[in-house]
Amino acid sequence: MRVGLGYDSHRFDPSRPLVLGGVEIPGSPGLAGHSDGDAVAHAVIDAILGAVSAGDVGRHFPPGGDQWKGADSMELLERSVGILGEMGFEPHNVDVVVITEAPKIGPFSAAMTRRLSQVLGIPEEAVSVKGKTNEGMGWIGTGEGLAVHAVALVTEIGPGVS
């Protein structure tokens, strides 16, 4: 078993839709970024890749050039699960905290959990997504953007299991 920690943060960009954990959240400004800006997916990618010392989202999907411009981050997560598998590991569980004053994450948590579990190939019960505020403090508290922390447990793929 190995544990990885992921983190991502982005400024809000009102010209884009907000996508978190593969779920579009209506009525909220999106996130600036080279891909679709899905900070949940990026933090989870960093957590699973970090658990096996395979680098981070920027190493595998560099921001620059056109290859990953506007990319669906859930597809990047799926590719990252493939990298994990090539190294003989698979995700076991993921815990995610989205830190933002708005939007409220609770109403979208179940949908994000479902989408992440599908892409990670693990049961919904093995995925946790929750929201916290920053109590009005700092750049998150003033509504400039949001941050995400993720922790992942990965395990070796057993014999005969793929």
Image (spheres, helix red, strand yellow):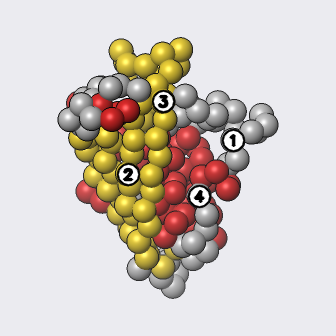
Total marks drawn? 4
Of mark 4 and mark 1, the one earlier in the sequence is: 4
As measured in the structure, the alpha-carbon distance from the residue carrying label 4 to the one carrying label 1 is 12 Å
Mark 2 lies on residue: 149
Mark 1 lies on residue: 63
Q: Position of residue 140 (x, y in %)?
A: 35, 33
Res 11 label: 3
Which amino acid type is marked by label 1?
Answer: Pro
Instruction: Give SS at disc 3.
Output: strand
Of mark 1 and mark 2, the one earlier in the sequence is: 1
As measured in the structure, the alpha-carbon distance from the residue carrying label 1 to the one carrying label 3 is 16 Å
Of mark 1 and mark 3, the one earlier in the sequence is: 3
Q: Nearer the viewer, mark 3 or mark 4?
A: 3
| Residue found 48% across the figure and 30% down from its top | 11
Instruction: Give SS at disc 4.
Output: loop
As measured in the structure, the alpha-carbon distance from the residue carrying label 3 to the one carrying label 4 is 20 Å
Instruction: Give SS at disc 2.
Output: strand
**Image quadrant where residue 95 sits:** bottom left
Of mark 2 and mark 3, the one earlier in the sequence is: 3
Of mark 2 and mark 4, the one earlier in the sequence is: 4
